[in-house]
Amino acid sequence: MGIAIESPSRRGLLKTGAALTVSFALPLAGTRAALAQAAEPGASGGPSNTFAPNAWLRITPDNKVTVVCGSAEMGQGVLTAIPMMVAEELDADWALVSVEQAPVDAAYNNPMFGMQATGGSTTVRAHWTPVRQAGAAARQMLVAAAAQQWQLDAASLRTERGQVIGPNGRKASYGSLVAAAAKQPVPDKPALKDRKDFRIMGKPTRRLDSAAKINGTAKFGIDARVDGMLVAVMARAPIAGAKPKAFDEGKAKAIKGVRKVIALPSGVAVLADGYWAARQGRDALGIEWDLGAHADLSSDKVSSTLDEGLQNATAIALETGNVKDGSANSARSLSAQYDVPYLAHACMEPLNCLAWVRGDEVTIWAGTQSQGPAQGILSQVAQVTPAKVKVNTLLLGGGFGRRFAPDFTIDATLLSKLSGSPVKLIYAREDDMAAGFYRPTSRVRFDAGLDDQGRPLMLRADVASPSIMAASGFMKIPENGVDAMAVEGLADHPYEIPHQRIAYGRAEPGPQVWFWRSVGHSQNAFFIESFIDELAHAAKTDPLKYRLALLEKHPRARGVLLLAAEKAGWSRPLPKGRHRGIAVAESFGTWVAEVAEVSVGKDGAIRVHRVTAAVDCGQTVNPQTISRQIEGAIVYGLSAALYGRITFKDGKVEQGNFHDYPVLRLSEMPKVDVHIVQSAEAPGGIGEPGTPPIAPAVANAIFAATGKRLRALPFDGEALKQA
């Protein structure tokens, strides 16, 4: 029977790793990466034939432009968007532009985060100005170099497709100017183009990473290999906080190819020559778990904890007018309670990390959303300086917030440190399902009062949910006690209602919670948009007209609603048995309205036939990516609305893989139409805003079809069965 490692040095190392899994707000490396050093004009040791005025781009004599992207690519298109932004201001020839993934360096910090990390639908909007300035600065230096060579005023020159052009038609390619341009001073605030002059941005553009993904040459985290590596599979705790009490190391080592068994705070790892041997060894461990304080965790206990949270919802997120007066003056009142469960991220590519600790150096290869924090975290895990940690960011086969967490990089680094070998840790999907980091469960209780015209006078909402801010390890709940993520999209909903009170009650049933695609908006849009629909039907008013009347101060909301309704044919009749529902939501600086066309069978089966989406994300970089992201977000949100649910029994998670945590199948995919509003507003995010409206749009269509209001996710088809 195996036991956990007890040597003092390893025990101390394991304690360090355990602490870092719950708190990882660590400083980034203070030194600049080699690439950024080489990019400095005149930097010693920099390549003499390369023009690299900043960390974002390099131009070589063959006229090729390489853009360096500091954000992680998880399907959202940043490896094309960032180059498009640079190339636009540079006036580059797009056919000669390529992209590379950046190392960890403060030069690539996300301005909205203050660290190099990818999430919150921030990449384009955070880098909108600095990345364009990088391209504009390079262009200005190239023009200055040509002006100096030709003895002309720089103002008389123009650029186009990688060339500087003089008033007499004389031309010089960017490649021919690299040496001279490198000697020019780097402008601090170069002028940016007017959007009417954009030639690349705003145009549908094929993604730079598509070909490699199609032909199989693209490298995802799970593709990483080094000679001599071991593959690790862990028996992870069945619930956060559980500890391995005993396990049979001998049985695991009896499996051919198994080399080591190592216990960590998060579980027991089996290291082997390959994945299958490691997986078989893991299954042979026969672990006995100490479930600790959550041994009695069940879905019923989760529900009772949420009820307690509602009773204690006293942290005020929004208060306007006086809800008592509003209630007293109402001609009619309505109440309703809505629920959503815990959700897993269910990334297609299982979590993985290849780590190699060699002396005082650490190298990892991983698809991570948080390269910058990883450098600081892993320096403490391996007890080295941050400058000695190299993070190779590979493509992510789905992120959705899950790969922002550090657990898989920490465990891989610990295993390499303890084993003395490079270790590639791969989570079995069942282990990831049980590893926590869920979208929080949430419950809301609404009370509303309507005037004699059916308009809402009063709205009260009490929300109970676990706190992502508290669970994150790097955020703090403010003094008012409101977790902003638990109420986002609800406390700041756009509807004009005179008397409102939105309150939060923290409820912590036990499971670890984390950021999930669109975070609090994912549930709160379902809550508020379903309830607004209830109010519209109570007022005997068309749900679209009802919304428009309450959105007089929100022209962007009205704009997407009207566009989605028009394109969906809201006022036109549908084939028999089909019905429409509508919803609108703002998240991450972007407005999205969706109309769902739904039918419900006699057996309660829900079929979504078509979704029409209208999106106002401000100024755009790549409309093709915007459409694809809205489509993907709809698939993700629809999977959750129809199927997604993490439940508990006897302290353990009941779901393990796609057989009991299903996602939308190809045969279930609705037709999706995406319509983009032409806008001069500042750019908003696009990776997440398509998810929040889909669940309420479908719920509202189900009500139109059946007259039954489903107030919990996933939708219960049993409740829709016809007698």
Image (spheres, grey):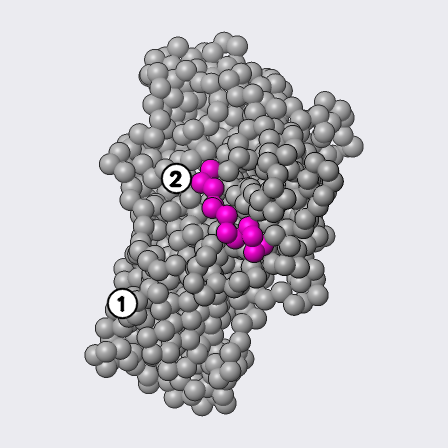
The quarter of the picture where residue 150 lies is top right
Mark 2 or 1: the one toward you: 1
> Quick check: 258 above or below 605?
below
Under mark 2, the amino acid is Ala
Q: Front-most of 114 and 413?
A: 114
Q: Front-most of 180 and 76?
A: 180
Write down the residue under mark 2: 486
Where is residue 667 drawn, in percent x and y?
72, 52
The quarter of the picture where residue 282 lies is bottom left
The N terminus appears in which quarter of the rendering? bottom left
Write down the residue under mark 1: 16
Element type at mark 1: helix
Q: Residue furthest left?
A: 8
> Quick check: 510 above or below 135?
below
Q: Residue at x 30, y 62 (%)?
A: 20
Q: Residue at x 48, y 65 (%)?
A: 392
The C terminus appears in which quarter of the rendering? top right
Asked if residue 691 shows in the view, the reply is no
